[in-house]
Image (cartoon, rainbow, N blue to C red):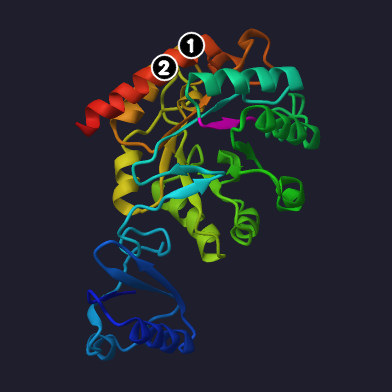
């Protein structure tokens, strides 16, 4: 349920309303936008007297929300959310270029790539320290050592770091990470999502390879309902009947998610296609359909990468792509 307040409703009356609603045992979220203030109610609202609330002089309207997701609903929060990712803003017109290798392999590698992508225009550095792999025999990441190498790259470049967390038990290791990524395989790891909701760092939540948009938003709801509203959604491709690429990049998800939710939406064309030469056209298409950022894999030596080299761009390929992406955004914005 949402309660839309009248413009210029007195602050003291707003506070009285919120306190009264909390006394009913409801969770209450207040979103103050440019043109209106919305009070969102979370919990069992079946016993709430809508007519009584409508009769209050500060209330403009009361509506029930049919969607199972509440915190991330556009109805709950009409304005775009802007997420602060280590000093870089994402959403609400702010665009993020997130780049780096699939896996952190050495200090020399991650520092070199970090400097190269920053020079090209990236404003966040991605890199995997903990790597979920389909085969137990594949490289699983440098783990804690990899996190320390990411921090070295951050000191060298100033780029905030984005890296994947696989277990709630590892949260202490990630205290100095700027953005915690939840990979596709963990999108419905609900214990992990609830734990991430109890800490303040932004969470980049990837859509599972066989999950619906509703399921993605419900996973975001787990994080937000636990107390952390700093969530970034990520479309990274889904499994379909395509037999020439790793996944199918569902670009229609971008405008639909923007319609349903106030959360920023970034796109990962690298994992979506699994093929380096397909990354540029998909990145440009993602920018054209209004995404809030791009997550692109860049490696100094893709042919010898320990993971996902086939989908990684070289730094000299990434630099011109950034310029094209920015040009597309300017064209679309008119």
Determine whether label 1 and label 2 are within 8 Å by CB.
yes
Numbered mark located on residue 317 in the image: 1
Q: Mark number for residue 321?
A: 2
Q: Secondary structure at mark 1?
A: helix
Bin the neighbour count of mark 2 within 10 Å (Cα to Cα): few under 14, some 14-19, many 20 and up. many
Residue at 68%, 34% in the rendered image: 132
Q: Position of residue 128 (x, y in %)?
A: 66, 31
Residue 152 screen position, x and y as percent: 73, 30
Q: Determine which quarter of the picture holds residue 308.
A: top right
Name the residue at 47% across, 46% down: 232
* 273 to the left or right of 6: right
For the stretch drawn in magenta, the main secondary structure is strand
* Above or below 41: residue 213: above
Q: Is residue 136 left or right of residue 112?
A: right
Where residue 258 sits: x, y (%)? Answer: 32, 47
* Residue toward you, 126 or 272: 126
> Does the image show residue 160?
yes
Provide residue 44's location: percent of width, then percent of height. Answer: 44, 80
């Amino acid at each position: 349920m949402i309660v839309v307040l009248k413009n210029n409703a007195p602050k003291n009356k707003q506070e009285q309303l919120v306190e009264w609603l909390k006394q009913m045992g409801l969770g209450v979220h207040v979103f103050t936008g440019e043109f209106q203030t919305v009070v969102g109610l979370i919990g069992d609202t079946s016993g709430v007297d809508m007519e009584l609330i409508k009769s209050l002089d500060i209330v403009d309207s009361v509506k029930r929300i049919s969607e199972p997701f509440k915190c991330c609903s556009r109805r709950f929060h009409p304005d775009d959310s802007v997420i602060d990712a280590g000093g870089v803003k994402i959403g609400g017109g702010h665009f993020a270029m997130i780049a780096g290798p699939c896996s952190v392999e050495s200090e020399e590698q991650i520092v070199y790539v970090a400097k190269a992508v920053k020079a090209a225009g990236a404003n966040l550095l991605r890199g995997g320290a903990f790597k979920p792999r389909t085969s137990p025999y594949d490289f699983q990441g440098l783990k804690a050592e990899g996190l320390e190498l990411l921090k070295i790259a951050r000191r060298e470049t100033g780029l905030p770091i984005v890296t994947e967390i696989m277990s709630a038990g590892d949260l202490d290791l990630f205290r100095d990470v700027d953005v915690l990524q939840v990979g596709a395989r963990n999108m419905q790891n609900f214990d992990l999502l609830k734990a991430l909701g109890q800490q303040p760092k932004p969470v980049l939540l990837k859509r599972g390879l066989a999950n619906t948009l509703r399921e993605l938003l419900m996973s975001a709801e787990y994080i937000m309902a636990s107390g952390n509203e700093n969530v970034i959604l990520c479309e990274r491709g889904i499994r379909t009947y395509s037999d020439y690429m790793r996944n199918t990049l569902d670009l229609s998800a971008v405008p639909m998610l923007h319609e349903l939710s106030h959360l920023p939406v970034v796109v990962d064309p690298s994992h979506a296609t699994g093929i380096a030469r397909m990354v540029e056209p998909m990145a440009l298409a993602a920018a054209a359909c209004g995404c809030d950022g791009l997550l692109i894999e860049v490696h100094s030596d893709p042919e010898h990468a320990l993971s996902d080299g086939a989908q990684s761009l070289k730094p000299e390929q990434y630099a011109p792509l950034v310029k094209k992406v920015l040009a597309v955004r300017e064209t679309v914005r008119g």
